[in-house]
Image (spheres, coloured by chain):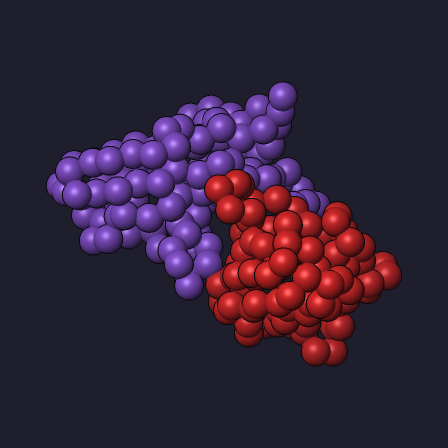
Chain colours: A purple, B red
Amino acid sequence: DGGITQSPKYLFRKEGQNVTLSCEQNLNHDAMYWYRQDPGQGLRLIYYSQIVNDFQKGDIAEGYSVSREKKESFPLTVTSAQKNPTAFYLCASSIARDNTEAFFGQGTRLTVV
Amino acid sequence: AQSVSQHNHHVILSEAASLELGCNYSYGGTVNLFWYVQYPGQHLQLLLKYFSGDPLVKGIKGFEAEFIKSKFSFNLRKPSVQWSDTAEYFCAVITNTGNQFYFGTGTSLTVIP
């Protein structure tokens, strides 16, 4: 089945530790995105990438880092610099041309204790 | 920067009532518009989209939306809601010159049987 896979579904980390969230897609999409979803704030863009080896900061990139070494993979690292990392993280992908719709993964709920 | 406003944060309806959720965006150029739905515990799914042509678009599960360019609006409607429509609804925009999706803060819909 084609789609976007995020792993793990739930993640717990101690404060001060970096953690990497996985996002893989087999839709052959060029563009990939990371969003953070908090109650009452909707989806806020962290980083996005239009092509391999290139990515841009979104509205709330501070404390996060990404890489795009392969077309199908776009991992997100939540660093210790992120002040409030506990959140629901969503990965999405789309065909970069024509601005077609974005497809979403199931999300990862990160809890930092 | 572009923005998307959803005016209704929480909506509670009885089954068979009609639904209209507001969405306004701020961008003067050409846009592509989307409504996504997030059922409890599930990933975001596309309800419907508007790229061009007939401003009244029909989506899945009996939903429709009307693009009114002069009002920068893309309101979602359903004539008769069901208990299974209980979910969170997000409006999203991508501009013809942009490469990222902008989401509203979401509307939580609860349908009472």
Residue B53 as seen in the image, left or right of residue A65: right
Residue A104 percent across, percent down from the top left: 54, 40
Residue positioned 43% across, 55% down in the render: A44
Residue B96 percent across, percent down from the top left: 66, 56
Residue A79 percent across, percent down from the top left: 22, 41
Residue A79 makes an appearance in the image:
yes
Which image quadrant: the N terminus of chain A?
top right
Residue furthest toward the top? A1
Q: Is residue B102 above or below residue A101?
A: below
Residue furthest toward the front? B113
Residue positioned 29% across, 44% down in the render: A64
Residue positioned 72% across, 52% down in the render: B48
Q: Is residue B74 above or below residue A63?
A: below
Residue B69 as seen in the image, left or right of residue B4: right
Residue positioned 39% across, 43% down in the render: A89
Residue B63 as seen in the image, left or right of residue B104: right
Q: Nearer the viewer, residue A13 or B86?
A: B86
Which image quadrant: the C terminus of chain A?
top left
Residue A112 as seen in the image, left or right of residue A39: left
Residue A80 percent across, percent down from the top left: 18, 43
